[in-house]
Image (spheres, grey):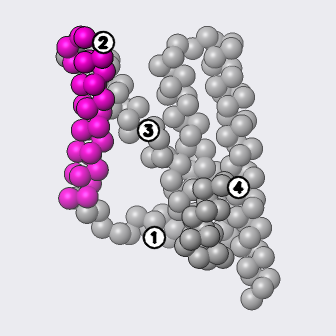
Amino acid sequence: MKGTDDMKTNYLKRYIISSYILVWMLIIFVAGSASLVFHAPPVIMWVIRNLIAWSPTYLILIGWKYFRPDETRTAFIKRCFSEKVKPLLLLFSFTLTFGISVLALFLFSIMTGKPMLSYINLGTISLPLSIFLSLTSGPTGEELGWRGFMREEFNRKYGFLKSSVYQGLV
């Protein structure tokens, strides 16, 4: 059984190293080119940054057989999304995030002495772009890789507490 654990560890090490190589290649070649060669505006750089953050998931989807040859990609994704979504928890999460944003805007408007509505632009491009960037930013895209694949592997080897620490370090 020790040999099987070593194999799993090797897949995990390969995944972590490959993730960092991929993200740095994307930063250097995609973001670097967009910024230095094409002088992309900040909004385009924001989109590029969000898409680069998805690199752990790209790696899992593209190189699946290399990291977990004993399971199909479809079975893995079904397992990752098999739990039911709790609507109340989802609503609470959205409300909390929205509430914090409104509170921050309110405090900022007090500090600057301008009305809150002067900072809100519901123009034809701003709102759809804000929605797109909100859906693609943060952990949205990278979680299938980090929390799906890597967390499972760490949990198998180290248990929940150690896994949490190791994952945080990675």
Q: Nearer the viewer, mark 2 or mark 4?
A: 2
What is the distance, in whole Å, between disc 3 and disc 1 at their CAs?
22 Å
What is the distance, in whole Å, between disc 2 and disc 4 at their CAs?
44 Å
Is 52 located above or below residue 153 in the figure? Answer: above
What is the distance, in whole Å, between disc 3 and disc 4 at their CAs?
22 Å
Would you name the residue on which mark 1 appears?
A: 79
Please name the residue shown 45% across and 37% down the image: 137
Is 119 located above or below residue 170 in the figure? Answer: above
Q: Secondary structure at mark 2?
A: helix
Task: Return the mark for residue 112.
Answer: 2
The number of discs equals 4
Q: Main secondary structure of the magenta part?
A: helix
Would you name the residue on which mark 3 appears?
A: 136
What amino acid type should be assigned to the residue bearing mark 3?
A: Thr
What amino acid type should be assigned to the residue bearing mark 4?
A: Ile
Tag 2 near tag 1, CB within 8 Å: no
Within 10 Å of the Cα at label 2, are there few (<14), some (14-19), or many (20+) other Cα atoms? Answer: few
Would you name the residue on which mark 4 appears?
A: 16
Q: Secondary structure at mark 4?
A: helix
What is the distance, in whole Å, between disc 1 and disc 4 at their CAs?
21 Å
Which residue range is magenta in the image? Answer: 88-116
Q: Secondary structure at mark 1?
A: helix
Is 122 located above or below residue 140 in the figure? Answer: above
Q: Secondary structure at mark 3?
A: helix
Q: Position of residue 146 (x, y in %)?
A: 57, 56
Could you tell which of marks 3 and 4 lies nearer the N-terminus? 4
Instruction: Locate residue 23: give its quadrant.
Output: top right
Within 10 Å of the Cα at label 4, are there few (<14), some (14-19), or many (20+) other Cα atoms? Answer: some
What amino acid type should be assigned to the residue bearing mark 1?
A: Arg
Tag 2 near tag 4, CB within 8 Å: no
Instruction: Locate residue 72: give its quadrant.
Output: bottom right
What is the distance, in whole Å, between disc 2 and disc 3 at their CAs?
30 Å
